[in-house]
Image (cartoon, helix red, strand yellow):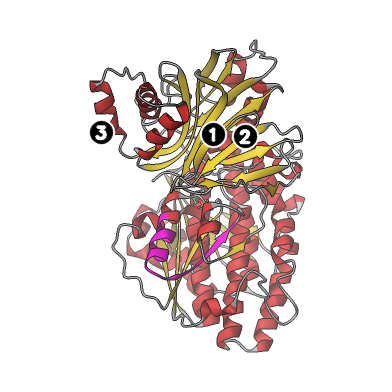
Amino acid sequence: MCGIVGYLGSKKTKDILLDGLQELEYRGYDSAGIAVLQNDDFSVYKAVGKLINLQEKASSFDPTGFAVGIGHTRWATHGKPTELNAHPHLGECSYVVHNGIIENYAVLKQTLQKNGAKFLSQTDTEVIVHLFEKELKSSASAFDAFTKTVSQLHGSFAILLVTKSEDKTIFFAKQGSPMIIGKDADSEKYFASSDTPLIGRCSEVIYLDDGDYGYVTPDEIAIFDKDSKKKTPYFSKLSTNKLSAQKSGFRFFMEKEIYEQSEVIVDTLTGRITDKEIHFEELDSRLFEGINEIKLCACGTSYHAALASSYLFERYAKIRVSVEIASEFRYKEPLLCKDTLFVVISQSGETADTLETLKMAKKAGLKTLVVCNVDNSSMVRLADASLLTRAGIEKGVASTKAFATQLVVLWMLSLYLAKIKSSLSSDEIARQISLLREVPGLLKIKEELHEKITRLSKRYLHGHGFFFIGRDVFYPLALEGALKLKEISYLHAEGYPSGEMKHGPIALADPELFTIALLPRHMLYEKNKSNVEELSARDSTICAISPVEFDKADDYVKTSDVKDYMLEFFEMMVIVQLLSMEIAIRLGNDVDMPRNLAKSVTVE
Ligand code: M6R
């Protein structure tokens, strides 16, 4: 949930740490901090709120020559977003940064306090540094003390620790939270909790595995596995393309990412479709042998993609599908049968709840597949097979292009399976593939459309709530539209199946209840229309999104006359994304970093 960086070398340490944190700020911006160790002396800066506050505080700090530095940007879990709770956390002579949760911190803290340790913060993280210093007193070396410390921690963590007695070393440990070591052309070493801070600086990286710990000095990278066996560092090449991680003239990353959807879907499709079939190089069709059910599991937007695809799997591949919210699934003592293919969907591949369900499925001996945007993420490394969505780096906290690409991959997967099961004719598969080819074109946003949505947005800044409604795959799309609006505008919004409104929520209808009605021509148009008419009759304010003019609507956004409901789906998806964004912009919100949220939820 938080972001971590580290560096040992003679370049501009402060700039390297702050630039790295800038790349990770989207992961948490309750506070940020850096600690730099040079000539036996620590310089530490911390600030509450966005990184700019830390940059200002540290503006006159300019270390030159060799230094060792660690930095952190925080999304608060234990303890309020205050400066005292900001990382790095101090013991007597050491500092630590941590991402994740130390589950047994309360017990450890009690024991440490009894031994005289003085805690300054309310965080779970602070126990690490006090525990280390306690162990240091009775250990042969700092590494020995660090090893003993890590062995006592339960939970998920990525940790960097620096200490005065070893002033040319960074100690690290990884368990359940991502951590990467990078090396630049001068063989100087870097750390980061994702690869973005390293792009442009490092040419090679090591993706640490769960259970790995060790230390890095100017001359050595020492990695030990969970059984304390020394590992040979394995370097992978790092991409050099940073351009895609910048805003390219758009007001917000979210806006850039909405506009990018057309291009990234070309990438998602590339090499995976011929005129007649879906081809996934990454998949061995034996994965589906003996499979009678698919269980899709995810959180947030990825859950909506899962739910939408469940209609396609049943409709096209004629296979039983269940869809689970990961945070619920992990505690419901689910019955897991070996004829079920367990599929997790995640943009980041690091979401704690989803990752845990994947571990459960693996433990139960199920075959597993992940649909993910981040190669080398924890889920990709854990699952039996993976399909990458190829959306590129998604920086906006509100997910957009990740959703679009997930849906395309899952749609393709339903056709891939339909072919294996002979549940669709080859003509129908070919027709579906021709539809897939049309998606990128449909996602090119016309200026008039965006202008219309911007104009419209000014009428939707108040009210007592929004209902996004739709049927079939447009119901998960309604859920997604409502989630987008909630996340960035802070207005109350719900997604609902159109036909379900009359079973309760219609009681809320009045002119201050805004209904965003998804009315595709090719999916239950008449049924949907009567549900919207029922709301219109009760004076709810209606914004209809449809290719068919709808005279009962107060506002109307016209979509193209395309030939299939899935094409309507993608066009409507862009409209709800843009509408949410324009409302949030008018309300003056920071669309890319909405309050209380973080990009990747690596804690429970
Ligand atoms: O990285 P994941 O796809 O696993 O993330 C799941 C959710 O946390 C994520 O989709 C979240 O709901 C987004 N903020 C939605 O915009």
Residue 220 is tagged as: 2
Q: Residue 545 bears which disc, if any?
A: none
Does the segment drawn in magenta span residue 365? yes
Q: Nearer the viewer, residue 529 or 10?
A: 10
Q: Judge from the rendering whether residue 588 lies leftward or rightward of residue 151; answer left or right.
A: right
Closer to us: 213 or 571:
213
Would you say 101 lies left or right of 551 here? left
Label 2 element class: loop
State the residue at coordinates (59%, 79%): 285
Q: Amino acid at mark 1?
A: Tyr
Q: Are marks 2 and 3 in contact (CB under 8 Å)?
A: no
CA–CA distance between discs 1 and 2? 8 Å
What type is the residue that disc 3 sits on? Val
Residue 146's place in the image compared with 353, above or below, is above
Q: Position of residue 441 (x, y in %)?
A: 75, 63
Q: Are marks 3 and 1 in contact (CB under 8 Å)?
A: no
Q: What secondary structure is found at the residue carrying circle 3? A: helix
Residue at 38%, 34% in the rendered image? 148
Q: Which residue is mark 1?
A: 215
Discs 1, 2 touching: Cβ within 8 Å: yes
Q: Amino acid at mark 2?
A: Glu
Using the numbered discs, state the Cα–Cα distance from disc 3 to disc 1 in whole angstroms.
Answer: 27 Å
The tag earlier along the polypeptide, 2 or 3, is 3
> Residue 363's x, y, as percent?
38, 64
Highlighted magenta segment, given as a residue range: 356-372
Camera-nearest label, 2 or 3? 2
Give the mark nearest the N terminus, 1 or 2.
1
The quadrant in which residue 264 appears is: bottom right
